[in-house]
Amino acid sequence: MFGSRIEQFADHGEHVGVRVERVDGPAQLDADVVITSLGYDVDAEGATTLGLPHDPATGAYRHEGGRVVTTGAVRDGPGIYVTGWAKRGAQGGIGANRLCAAETVQTFVDDVAGGVIVSPKRTRETLRDALRLKGISTTDARGARAIDRAERSRGETADRPRVKFVTTDELARTAARTHRLSVRGRSARG
């Protein structure tokens, strides 16, 4: 039922009834499990809002190796990069996202090395302060490593590679807890 729009769920005891709207009309399904994928599509309105070119054929932003191309020239959009479905359209999963991200990162690194991207005049602290003013929390590499360790630890108890945190609050608390521990450790030593 790919491409269908879910209209309604109904509980039928052991099964779930799902009414969907398809291009060729409505359909009714019975299922043991329903998994939805919301997907992503770059539409002309969203692309206009962001001021980025969009390709209606792919449902993604126009790019070259992940670097957004605004007027057709490869080097005309330095500093704007896309990955995932914004880059490929609504296709592919985790494996494709990793390869896609690696390509975009390499394009960015090449742009920095080639002088296309110049060093910012502002500092990290300036960015961090601006994000905090907007209510956006951040973490550094140490916090990211702490989150990774905690998710892997949670996975061990569930016999899985990792159990991911699902809320921003959980992520922020885990990253912040590591900072408090390292500050206490430094002050305790000296």
Image (spheres, helix red, strand yellow):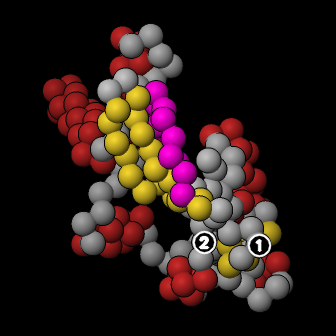
In this rendering, the answer to whether 14 lies above or below 86 is above
Q: Earlier in the sequence, mark 1 or mark 2?
A: 2
In this rendering, the answer to whether 45 lies above or below 17 is below
Residue 38 sits inside the magenta stretch: no
The answer to which of 36 and 139 lies nearer the viewer is 36
The answer to which of 109 and 71 lies nearer the viewer is 71
User: Residue 142 is drawn in which quadrant?
Assistant: top left
Q: Residue at x 43, y 57 (%)?
A: 7
Give the residues drawn in magenta, as a range: 26-37
Q: Residue at x 41, y 18 (%)?
A: 155
State the image coordinates of residue 153 (x, y, percent, origin top left): 38, 18
Left of 188 or right of it: where is 64? right
Residue marked by disc 1: 57
Residue 35 sits inside the magenta stretch: yes
Residue marked by disc 2: 42
Check disc 2: other Cα within 10 Å, few if <14, some if 14-19, many if 20+.
Answer: many
Disc 1 element: loop
Q: Residue 94, can we see it?
A: yes
User: Residue 65 is drawn in which quadrant?
Assistant: bottom right
Residue flagged by tag 1: what amino acid is it?
Ala
Q: Residue at x 60, y 83 (%)?
A: 44
